[in-house]
Image: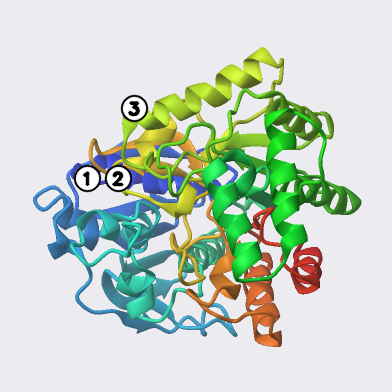
């Protein structure tokens, strides 16, 4: 198949076409650059497929300018093409498609829309208010404003393209995508939080005595603190939950990825356990020996700080190397899901990681990147694709349950909300990425929901 593309925004167009076509086309693809204002595919049987590039047309003169944000969103009815499908939101171009026996012209800028969503372009140009942790808010996203945050419209558009290409030439080889899952745990606290700090032990034990009237609990905190400092064995709920997570996932045949904070960058938000201590090494050994994955959870201030990120990454790599732990891939997730669209992707790439799995909104579930499939990230500042892969986070337990976010608690609505996204991923043949912290098993309902999702 031959694809002819414009000379402008060439890096962005090439990145998007290569990703999109790799999702469903299994044949050879040649790409040529010409002076033109659309994208033209010539199929093996001589059929043609032209697509608008209205977003890319404006890029070179207004790169990283908020004027490129869609001012309105229309809808395209695809029910005649894909019976039973919902209308697709049209961010760029016009909701019009003309199809004849051997040709299609599409006024929708499908590739521009996909690039816009995958690259998080809107987050790099908007000057909207951030939350208390400096995070871009879901309510400021185009997807939320136009009511498609719950839909992976990148995948829906790719499905439409798959169908249209095949309708023009039924001889082309179409890939079949497999549903996958990635169970993850951000190990913010590998051991009970108060055990690493005498200040926290004092504060927690005073609370036990004065507020909760639990002197035995206060005593246990001090025993736990002393045992931890002396490297003595003592029951630790946070630590036990890591092993429990492995136990229940192994029953289902799942491999779990555990992400660790290796360097304390903020005394309030980061744990400050010695990552090279015997306690941590024993935990890492168990995870590795049981066939699970160890990854990085860069501290609170790492998301836009190259030096702190590198220090954290080097700590992880050094410890794994010293322990003789070799893994097929190395990934992780940002602490508190903090993210800067201009900076963070490049930090993961520069430090040689295979993937990151940060991109979901903390306060509201949804498809932040418009997809439930992994994709290579893009450097918006230097305008070039990166090697590191984004594996979008689909569900984080606290997003659905916590009172400060969706506040569904442990209701039937909460269970439905989790399963809604899992079903959507399965329908779109994607990767269901679940995050459940080892410190978020407060009651039997946590265990019940978790076991159901894995």
How far apart, in angstroms, are the residues tagged by discs 2 and 3?
Answer: 28 Å
Q: Position of residue 24 (x, y in %)?
A: 57, 52
Mark 2 or 3, nearer chain start: 2
What residue does disc 2 label?
A: 12
Mark 3 or 1, closer to the camera: 3
Q: For marks 3 and 1, give the CA distance.
A: 31 Å
Residue depicted at 81% across the width and 34% down the height: 291
Determine whether the residue tagged by mark 3 lies in a helix, strand or loop: helix
Q: Report which residue position mark 1 lands on.
A: 9
Q: Nearer the viewer, mark 2 or mark 3?
A: 3
User: Are the residues at dot 2 and dot 3 in contact (C-beta closer than 8 Å)?
Assistant: no
Residue 317 screen position, x and y as percent: 57, 21
Q: Position of residue 153 (x, y in %)?
A: 47, 69
Can residue 437 be seen from the camera position used here? yes
Q: Residue at x 36, y 63 (%)?
A: 110
Task: Check contact, mark 2 vs mark 1: CB within 8 A.
Answer: yes
The residue tagged 3 is 307
Give the residue furthest to the right. Answer: 251
Q: Which badge, 3 or 1, comes first in the chain's sequence?
A: 1
- Count every numbered label the image shows and give the total: 3
Against 211, residue 247 (above or below) is above
The 10 Å Cα crowd at callout 2, few under 14, some 14 to 19, many 20 or more, is: many
Specify whether residue 46 is in view: no
């Amino acid at each position: 198949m031959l694809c002819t593309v414009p000379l402008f925004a060439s890096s962005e167009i090439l990145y998007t076409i290569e990703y999109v076509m790799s999702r469903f086309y299994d044949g050879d693809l040649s790409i040529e650059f010409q002076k033109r204002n659309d994208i033209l595919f010539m199929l093996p049987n001589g059929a043609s497929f032209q697509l608008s590039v209205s977003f890319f047309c404006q890029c070179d003169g207004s790169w990283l300018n908020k004027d490129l944000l869609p001012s309105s969103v229309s809808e395209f009815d695809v029910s005649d093409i894909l019976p039973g499908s919902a209308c697709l939101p049209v961010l760029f171009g016009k909701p019009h498609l003309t199809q004849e026996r051997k040709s299609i012209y599409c006024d929708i800028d499908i590739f521009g829309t996909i690039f816009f969503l995958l690259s998080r372009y809107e987050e790099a140009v908007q000057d909207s208010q951030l939350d208390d942790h400096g995070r871009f808010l879901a309510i400021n996203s185009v997807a939320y404003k136009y009511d498609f945050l719950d839909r992976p419209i990148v995948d829906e558009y790719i499905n439409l393209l798959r169908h249209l290409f095949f309708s023009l030439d039924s001889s082309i080889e179409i890939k079949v995508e497999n549903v996958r899952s990635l169970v993850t745990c951000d190990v913010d606290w590998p051991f009970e939080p108060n055990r690493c700090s005498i200040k926290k032990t004092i504060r927690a034990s005073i609370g036990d005595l004065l507020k909760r009237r639990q002197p035995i609990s206060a005593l246990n905190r001090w025993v736990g603190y002393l045992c931890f400092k002396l490297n003595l064995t003592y029951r630790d709920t946070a630590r036990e939950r890591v092993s429990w997570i492995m136990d229940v996932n192994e029953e289902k045949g799942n491999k779990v990825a555990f992400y660790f904070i290796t360097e304390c960058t903020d005394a309030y938000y980061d744990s400050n356990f010695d990552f090279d201590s015997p306690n941590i090494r024993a935990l890492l050994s168990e995870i590795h020996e049981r066939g699970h994955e160890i990854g990085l959870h860069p501290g609170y201030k790492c998301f836009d700080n190259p030096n702190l990120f590198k220090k954290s990454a080097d700590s992880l790599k050094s410890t794994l190397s010293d322990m003789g732990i070799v893994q097929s891939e190395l990934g992780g997730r940002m602490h508190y899901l903090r993210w800067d669209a201009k900076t963070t992707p490049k930090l993961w790439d520069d430090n040689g990681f295979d993937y990151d799995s940060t991109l979901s909104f903390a306060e509201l579930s949804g498809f932040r990147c418009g997809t439930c499939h992994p994709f290579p990230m893009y450097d918006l500042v230097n305008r070039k694709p990166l090697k590191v892969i984004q594996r979008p986070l689909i569900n984080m337990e606290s997003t659905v349950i916590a009172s400060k976010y969706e506040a569904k608690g442990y209701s039937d609505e909460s269970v439905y909300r989790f399963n809604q996204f899992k079903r959507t991923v399965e329908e779109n043949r994607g990767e269901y990425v679940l995050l459940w912290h080892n410190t978020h098993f407060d009651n039997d309902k946590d265990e019940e929901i978790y076991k159901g999702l894995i």
